[in-house]
Amino acid sequence: MPTTRIKAFKSPDPRLPHETRSNFLQKLDPWFVGFAHFFKENATQGVDRPKRTRKEGLVEKGSRSQSVKLPPAPVLPGWPRTVGEMLGLLAGSGDSRFAEAIGAIQERIPPETLAMDLNQVLPNLVSLLKYQATVPDLRSREMRGDRSAGLKVVETADIYNRWMHEQLPRGGVRFKTNACHNLLMLFGLTGGLDRLSSRELADFFDKFCSCGQTHTLEVLRRLRWKLMGAMERGREATDSIVAGSP
């Protein structure tokens, strides 16, 4: 994905080349390790491919091609209405590693969350990837007089509506941070990345990140801390809204 920063979250050589890598895989859930392999193989696919080719949805697996059941366009019938319906559709995507990861995530999500409307959930994903903050948190800050938070709410809604109607810019949405890093970290917080030391976290990203560069320990540690804090503030803001509703 495009970024407004040069070589975001990268450093030329933050660790000595003779240092051995840590055995971080044993601390991660197996489903997430499989997802991380899948993510690395597919994170950059489709960016420069023609739209018609992308919609064919074929995943190469060894010498075989496997059909992927992609969600329909949001403006067409059949688009999932709830979180549970979306996860169920993704679980049948055709790649066993991805399906296993989605299944593990489904088991960890409360029933009330699975029943939530996607129109409430997907904008949060957009705002987390772009601003590292949830929509409820942004709205709470806006109500306290933070005008920049209000602008981010408007921009998040614009991106989400353009995506829903397949009207995003051809060059994609620009992010101040590395959206692939954010997405991998968000998935990983449910799969064991919160249990890794800073060194192990950097080793994980060196191995599984699609950028193929060596990563900075402190920057990734701050990213993890920031995303965990963003999700916690989002939960607190949501609870506050629910508590204040009639």
Image (cartoon, rainbow, N blue to C red):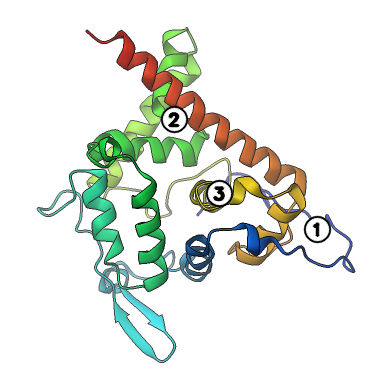
Q: Is residue 179 left or right of residue 46?
A: right
The residue under label 1 is which amino acid type? Pro
Q: Which residue is mark 1?
A: 12
Q: Is residue 120 left or right of residue 49?
A: left
Q: Which residue is mark 3?
A: 185
Q: CA distance from mark 2 to mark 1?
A: 32 Å
Q: Position of residue 54 (x, y in %)?
A: 32, 69
Q: Secondary structure at mark 2?
A: loop
Label 2 or label 3, whichever comes before in sequence order: 2
Rendering quarter of residue 94? bottom left
Label 2 or label 1, whichever comes before in sequence order: 1
Q: Is residue 84 above or below residue 99?
A: above
Q: Secondary structure at mark 1?
A: loop
* Mark 1 neighbour class, 10 Å CA radius: few under 14, some 14 to 19, many 20 or more: few
Q: Which mark is residue 134?
A: 2
Q: Position of residue 103 (x, y in %)?
A: 35, 58
